[in-house]
Image (cartoon, helix red, strand yellow):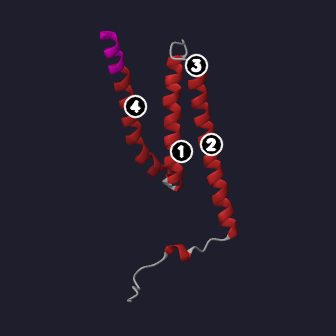
Amino acid sequence: MDQRDDIIEYSLYNHHSEEEGKKLRKKIWKVTLILSVVTAVEVLLGALIKQGSDMWLTVKVLFIVLTLLKAGYIVLTFMHLGDEKKVLKWIILIPYLIFMVYLIFIGLTEGAAVGAKM
């Protein structure tokens, strides 16, 4: 049986110190805690405030804002955008932010127009 010498097993080449491993685990726990707290706030708001309430519009806006914050945090953390220079972050994020604002605007204005016709 021939063995290929062009295949590298990258898992055998982890040269991290214990200190780097501790930092990485601490970062993972921090990310997990932040995302869990934001999700818990969303669930509590949804459970405590009902759709017919006067506060429902505020809750919907909060859901949108919290979801966008979670998405941005995930991109900054897991896609390593947080490690880049500030200019590059904004060059990447601004088109997405503009697109999200546009989608929210369309959803709110068209949803209101459909609701008014019924």
Alpha carbon separation for disc pair 2 and 1: 9 Å
Which label's residue is closer to the chain start, 2 or 4? 2
Residue type, label 2: Ile
Alpha carbon separation for disc pair 2 and 4: 24 Å
Q: Which quadrant holds residue 117?
A: top left
Which residue position is annotated with label 4? 101
Residue type, label 3: Ile
The label nearer to you, 3 versus 1, is 3
Q: Residues within 10 Å of mark 4 (few under 14, many from 20)?
A: few
Alpha carbon separation for disc pair 2 and 3: 23 Å
Q: In the image, residue 88 lies at what x, y percent? A: 44, 52
What secondary structure is found at the residue carrying circle 1? helix
Q: Quadrant of the N terminus?
A: bottom left
Which residue position is annotated with label 1? 73
Circle number at residue 34:
2
The label nearer to you, 2 versus 3, is 3
Q: Which quadrant holds residue 108?
A: top left
Which residue position is annotated with label 3? 49
Which label's residue is closer to the chain start, 2 or 1? 2
Q: In the image, residue 20 lies at what x, y percent? A: 65, 65
Alpha carbon separation for disc pair 1 and 4: 17 Å
